[in-house]
Amino acid sequence: MGGEPLKSDQSFEEVVVQRRSIRRYQDREVPEELIVELLELAKQAPSSMNGQPWTFVVIRDAETKKRISELKNRFCPPEKRSFRAEFLSQAPVILVVGVEKSRSYGRELENGVLATGWLLLAAREKGLGSVYMSAYQPHDPGLAVEIGKLLHLPDDVQAVTILPLGYPDETPSKKELRPLTGMLHHEFYGE
């Protein structure tokens, strides 16, 4: 068994460790064939009962990106208001990851988040940047509903995440991580 080796000059570990949240992008188009490569990788993610429920909406239109930014700001919870979403308008591409509810077996959120994780790592490996943004919140589905209306999603499709995508125009500092010793337990919590 075993997978194919990575074809880039980065190891999987390097891709994982170097991935950062990117909110500023170069004024440079992302080729369609590169988007397709990312989506081909994203559809390799695991899904509940192998339902493969994903839908991906690729958005390049400036007005649609602006409206998504406005919606994201409008539905932003108070504790996150310092993280404004205007930068979405400047991203060359926005990917909205959705799932077909009928193929999700009650795991809409998990299925969408798994594909999104694959996309974030694939983007990093291909030299692109992105940042994870939620479209769906179980306690307040308003943003996902409005995005669904904006993008004409059918009733069976639930928007889960929003990913701006482009060539990074910033270099975030090294990520400070909690020590593993505070997270790791053997056999029982606290052991």
Image: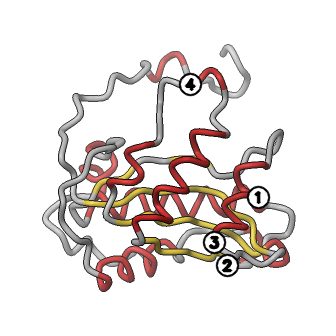
Q: Which residue type carries mark 1?
A: Val
Q: Which residue type carries mark 3?
A: Leu
Question: In this rendering, would 89 be left or right of 75?
Answer: left
Name above or below for residue 84 compared with residue 28: above
Q: Are marks 2 and 4 in contact (CB under 8 Å)?
A: no
Question: In this rendering, would 8 be left or right of 151?
Answer: left
Residue for badge 3: 151
Q: CA distance from mark 2 to mark 4?
A: 32 Å
Given residues 120 and 50, the one toward you in this image is 120
Q: Which percent across, then down, holds residue 19? A: 31, 46
Local secondary structure at mark 2: loop
Residue 52, labelled with which disc?
2
- Count all numbered tags in the image, as a single digit: 4
Q: CA distance from mark 2 to mark 1?
A: 22 Å
Residue at figure coordinates x 64%, y 52% from the top left? 135
Residue for badge 1: 145
Q: Which of the marked residues, 4 or 3, is nearer the chain's N terminus?
A: 3
Q: CA distance from mark 4 to mark 1?
A: 38 Å
